[in-house]
Amino acid sequence: MSEMNPNHASRPFPRLAGAVLFAAAIAAAPRAQLPVNFVEKAVASKAVFNEATSMAHADDGRIFVSERNGNIKVIKGDDAVLVHKVATTTDREQGLLKIQVHPGFAAKSFIYAFYLTADKNHHNITRIAIDKDNAVVKVDDIIRLPNLENEGRHNGGGIVFGKDGFLYVSRGNDELGGASNPAGLWTSQKGKVLRFTEDGLPAPGNPHYASGATAEEKSVWARGFRNPWTMSADPISGRILVGDVGDGTESIEDVTSPDPAKDYWYGYGVGGGDGVGTAGGKAIDPIYYHPTGGQGECAIVAEVPYNAAVASNWPAEYKNRIYTADYCGKTIRSVPLNNPAGSINMHTVGNGMVQFYQNSPTKVFLSLGMDGNLYYVSYGTAGKAMMIAYNGPVSTVDPAANSISVRNFVFRMGRSADVEFTVNGTLSLRDAGKAEFSVMGPDGKVRFRNSVHMRGNALRAEGFRPSAAGLYVCKLAWNGDGAERQAYGRLVVLP
């Protein structure tokens, strides 16, 4: 990798000092630590990724990974295969920065790619349509972002669909300072969060979406960012979060409903600097932040919201939280999703911060899978796709919920497996032997039906063998106290 300096806090792709130092660092690294009953598993044991920059989870079960060199791959069985390659460059902080899939991927199989063009001129958002066999059907360049300045630093790179159906894109300020800093200007897309339709047009409802405004002004949703490398959306609440890589402070910003009269807290054009309160009340403060360089951290690379309503077998105390990671720091932290008013330092004891995964591998993103587990790919030339899952007992949190929590949420197409699950409802041991479990495909037709039996504190249905990938609905039916009862859940089948 070229022109990468591990001491430059704004750069998400530092260059290693050399193979010998890297090997020594691995040998001396402390043992990784996850909470009790949490495990880390390889998603595709044979797959190796070269500088993976993001992962996208489709609603039909497919998982896509972007590599900095322009490759977009799909995990297939124990390996990963190439779907498409965009023409890009890996100079400085450049390359294929992020991918995202259409929220209705099962119906609209679109992959959106955010990357620098190979001529090193500007960033594109390209939409790639694929079929069920991962063959490319059509490629369209739908968004052209402004030309590059200052040798390609502070690119941003976040791209995510909101609950409103619009496409949010975060663009960095090109590391321009002083009077040249564009982050506070509505007339520039740099240092901004932009909002588009799925076809790449400025989204109605943007602050300057009006006649007379330029196309750049119409697309701006929020202003005042330095290097917003990553962005996440809560599919339940609709909140949009941004991780802004700072010079003295790393921050998590909530851009769900920005005040168009204010910049975000980096304060460009209204006070400058990098810290809470430096903008004299004219900036929007972050919801969380921590000092750059504190506890060995240099650049925030993830801020994943985990809502309690997300289908998952994770215990309640690990939900309603934001999971955050840093490039240099090895700890995955979590902080409350619904935090108190004001800005909270993530390093301050007593603010609800939890060190979820200490000494985890180097990474430049985290993602939340369809199964409610956290995913990432270790960053390097031989990266591995990993899933952080919960394997412990599942408690019943809502006796009236009548839902199923499937323990092994993700299945592989064509492989026989047993479905083990817990019922969040009223099911006695006496009734369990009379219960029937069934799985319905995306078309509503029953694909599997069998009786169940107890195994520990869970129920088990044996012999499920899915023949097609996708998101499935599972149903448990039983007679309890003379009344017919049903509980529903869902599971994902991967290709």
Image (tube, helix red, strand yellow):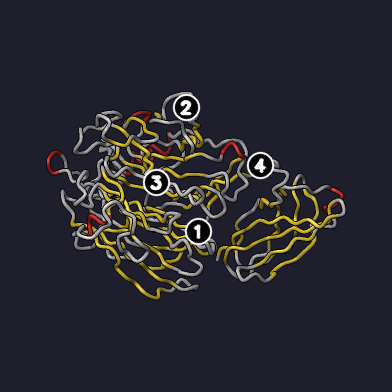
Q: Amino acid at mark 1?
A: Lys
Q: Gap in Å between the C-alphas at discs 1 and 4?
A: 27 Å
Does residue 15 appear in the picture of this structure?
A: no
Picture disc at residue 391: none
Does residue 205 appear in the picture of this structure?
A: yes
Question: Residue at coordinates 61% horizontally, 36% vertically from top-left?
Answer: 36
Depth-wise, is mark 2 or mark 1 nearer the camera? 2
Which numbered disc flags the more N-terminal residue, 2 or 4? 2
Verify CB contact (< 8 Å) between mark 1 and mark 4.
no
Q: Gap in Å between the C-alphas at discs 2 and 1?
A: 41 Å
Picture coordinates of residue 290 (x, y %)?
A: 36, 31
Residue 232 as seen in the image, left or right of residue 170? right
Q: Circle 2 sits in a helix, a strand or a loop, which is it?
A: loop
Q: Circle 1 sits in a helix, a strand or a loop, which is it?
A: loop
Which numbered disc flags the more N-terminal residue, 3 or 4? 3
Quadrant of the drawing holding the C terminus? bottom right
Picture disc at residue 351: 2
Decide: is 458 above or below 465. above
Label 3 sits on residue: 256
Which numbered disc flags the more N-terminal residue, 2 or 1? 1
Verify CB contact (< 8 Å) between mark 3 and mark 4.
no
Label 1 sits on residue: 46
Q: Amino acid at mark 2?
A: Asn
Q: Amino acid at mark 3?
A: Thr
Residue 210 as seen in the image, left or right of residue 131? left
Depth-wise, is mark 2 or mark 4 nearer the camera? 2
Q: Quadrant of residue 486?
A: bottom right
Q: Gap in Å between the C-alphas at discs 2 and 4?
A: 27 Å
